[in-house]
Image (cartoon, coloured by chain):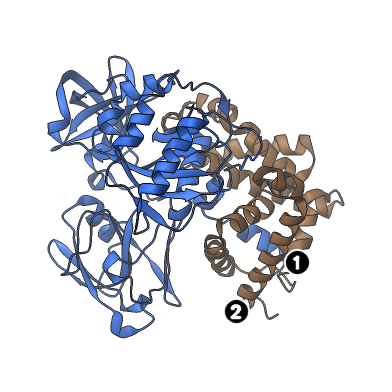
Chain colours: A brown, B blue
Amino acid sequence: MDDNRITELLFSRDGSALAALNEKYGAYCLKIAENVLRNRQDAEECVNDALLRVWRSVPPEKPASLMLYMARITRNIAFNRYNENTAEKRGGGECALVLDELAECVGGGGTEDEYFSKELGECIRGFVKGLPVRERNVFVRRYFYTEPAPEIAEKYGLTEENVRVILSRTRKKLKKLLIKEGFYNG
Amino acid sequence: MDEKDLYKAIGETDDHDLQQSETKQKSKKPFIFIAAAAALAAVAAAFALPMALKKEAPAEEKSKEYGKTYIAAENAVVFPWEYMTEAEKNAVVFLGGDMYVARDCKIDPALLEGPLGECEGKGYDVYAEKEYRAKLAASKIKGVNEKLLIAVKVGEDNVVYRRYEAESPKTWGEFYDKLALDKNLVLGKYAFGEDSYRIDDKWYELTSDAYIKSVLAECKNAPCSVKSVGSPAGGRVTFSVTSGALGVYKKSFEVYDTGFIETNIMEYGFIFDIGKEAAEKIIKYAKEHGTETEREFYYKSVAGIIKEIGKDYVLIDDTVLCKNAADGEVYKVKTDDIRVRRGLEFPKKLSVGDAVMVEYRGTADKNNTVTDPVGLREAAIYDGEAYVQE
């Protein structure tokens, strides 16, 4: 079903919108959640939660892309679940590796306030946008979609080593930017 | 800040960049046809590589050192009903039980063949939570099959509508004939790419595309059938296609040296197997007969600080984006088009001193008057670079 039609159904509060959303993007979101959680049952629950959240937020929101809107929501829910699991010593998997890699770019310390998060989000958005296409794609697949390097390599016709080198260079660039912008003292 | 903050912040990555990362590069197997809407965007993205940041200083101003400008591909703003264009209000129309969706292009009445009868336009006013329906006049487009495209009079203009969920063509010939591509396919500027992933910086144009179209006319039996997830492998030439009759603006038409053509002029990415011989003829011709030209951008843009807001215009000073302040200039943008005016008034009323970016399809003439603007959005300027967020 077309996204416009699904949005129409959501706006008219027609429950079949959720079935259509699940049919169209459920598998896509399940993959995102599984990348983060490495646990099928947890991932399925995340997708169900994401569907519910879409139902609650549309309307009033009207996403330009339902697929990406669901992707963001699923990622957020999955990451929150990951944090809960980590607290219960059930973390690990690809997300743990991704976080280890990202730790190279930051100095540690507590979570900052909402304003800081917004500023950081804008900084990252600009950073990603400014990357050359290949680097950008690889960065996005690894750090947004939490995909393993071999999967990214296959997707873009690169070797796994290429992917690791690209990611390493991009993290260095990111670290420099975060220092320059005052998010991290270096 | 720790790595979890950073991971969360990466969640703010722009929709366009997420979408673009969905584009697979397949180097081994040729693929034929992309059906899913998500994959469609991948096709567009392949062509959009050089346009990804679709930003450019006005053509006449290339000599000055200009800060980069970035704009989110998706605009999440939902405008109130009074700020919507007629085509946006009638986002879909129904004719004879078929649903058609508006394309963002007006069509010259001279391209219409005759009336198709009354259709029903449908839209939704999000703020009032009211459905909107209107009786509208539909027309046939000259030579174009009405089961694919129609023209609908909305307000003062005729706008092209594309049939939603139209059947996929079985052959290139069916696609070619139903869209009257002998007349409606005009191959614009083009660039080469060594693979399906990147495209060169150099752009070319032909004085005539007649030879290429004659080769294409000989390939009508080329099949279009297999569903897939990516573009064909191989080096390619990518043409920009704009057509009033088809209601398309700067779509792509690509010819791969592996023997495939791919186009998104009907939104979905259709791939046809025309064979290596025909593809090589086209690529060879394009290599030998093109003259180098300016790079193609989707829209041009001008960004800067609002200097003055008049009754039907706004003046924008771009000095803030120039490395050398003396290069700064003032551009005049007419605001009689609702797509421009609404940007000044919604979601907040902008005033002198605010930063904005205007996208336009036309030119900036010698008096720095921007023609054919398509939108104005509030911008943020950091370190001499302009950003428009989603």
Front-most of residues A126 and A79: A126
**Residue corresponding to mark 2:** A180
- Left or right? Give the position of B197 relative to B160: right
Q: Residue B325 carries which label?
A: none
User: Which residue is located at x 87 percent, y 52 percent?
Assistant: A89
Q: Where is residue B51 in the image (x, y as percent from the top left)?
A: 43, 54
Kindly tell me whether residue B270 is visible in this rendering: no
Q: Position of residue A76 (x, y in %)?
A: 64, 49
Kindly tell me whether residue B224 is visible in this rendering: yes
SS under mark 2: helix
- Left or right? Give the position of B210 relative to B285: left
**Residue corresponding to mark 1:** A103
Query: Residue farthest to the right?
Result: A89
Front-most of residues A110 and B315: B315
Q: Quadrant of residue B27?
A: top right
Q: Quadrant of residue A173?
A: bottom right
Question: The residue marked by circle 1 belongs to what chain?
Answer: A
Count neighbours of disc 2 (C-alpha within 10 A) and say few if under 14, some if 14 to 19, many if 20 or more: few
SS under mark 1: helix
Count neighbours of disc 1 (C-alpha within 10 A) and say few if under 14, some if 14 to 19, many if 20 or more: some
